[in-house]
Image (cartoon, rainbow, N blue to C red):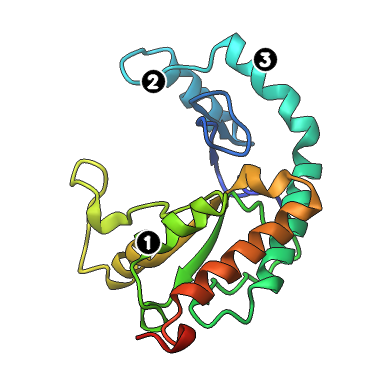
Amino acid sequence: GRPAGSWGDAGVLSFGGSKLLTAGRGGALLTNGAGVAQRAKVYTNRGNDAFAMSNLQAAALLPQLDSLAQHTATRAEAAAAVFEATAGEPSLGRPTPAESPGLPAYYKLAWRLRPERLRSTREEVVGALQAERAPIDTGFRGFTKRSARRCRVVGDLVNSAAAGEETLLLHHPALLGPPRAATQLAAALAKVLRHFGAGARGKT
């Protein structure tokens, strides 16, 4: 029931250009520890790869805090409507929501395609959805396709690889539209998945 970043010794937030709160780039370190805060301040004054947020970035970011709670509630309501409308689609699955008394932020709204229920590739499904003006894309590639510079991989990461090949992602601004937008999105998903479904109109 507490916001992310508000427990533990420190929390880290990203304010990149695509995030729920954005300053274009950069982020924030949250802490109640005076020692941690002091070490962070010293580090950001060293230069090199540590750059503190500018006053201009902060001026763009701070007003967004006033609407954060309302936007979170609006996104959650729209996501619930879309998930409910697409719950019966056999070729589409979604992660089980975590048990939590708080609202999820829905930075990315995700589904998992079930390849065995489709007679097409994910790219063709995404292309058809975008032709229906659904703001859906393939999303993240998965850690298995990232270079050793970006992350250290231990093991085969089978689930990460499958998610990277089968995930559909809806970017969060689409969840802040009018209520009819969620209905239109669900209709587009149903139309496209019926067309590409393994048993659609007797096609194989």
Whether residue 6 appears in this view of the structure is: no
Q: Quadrant of residue 103?
A: bottom right
Q: Amino acid at mark 1?
A: Glu
Structural crowding at the residue carrying mark 3, measured as other residues with C-alpha within 10 Å and reported as few (<14), some (14–19) or many (≥20): few
Residue under the point 42% across and 77% down:
114
Residue under the point 68% across and 64% down:
82
80 on left or right of 32: right
Q: To which residue does mark 2 refer?
A: 50
**Distance from Cα at disc 1 to Cα at disc 3:** 42 Å
119 on left or right of 19: left
Q: To which residue does mark 1 refer?
A: 124
Q: Is residue 33 above or below residue 55?
A: below
Q: Amino acid at mark 2?
A: Ala
132 on left or right of 119: right
Q: To which residue does mark 3 refer?
A: 59
Q: Which mark lies nearer to you, 2 or 3?
A: 3
Between discs 2 and 1, the one toward the N terminus: 2
Q: Secondary structure at mark 1?
A: helix
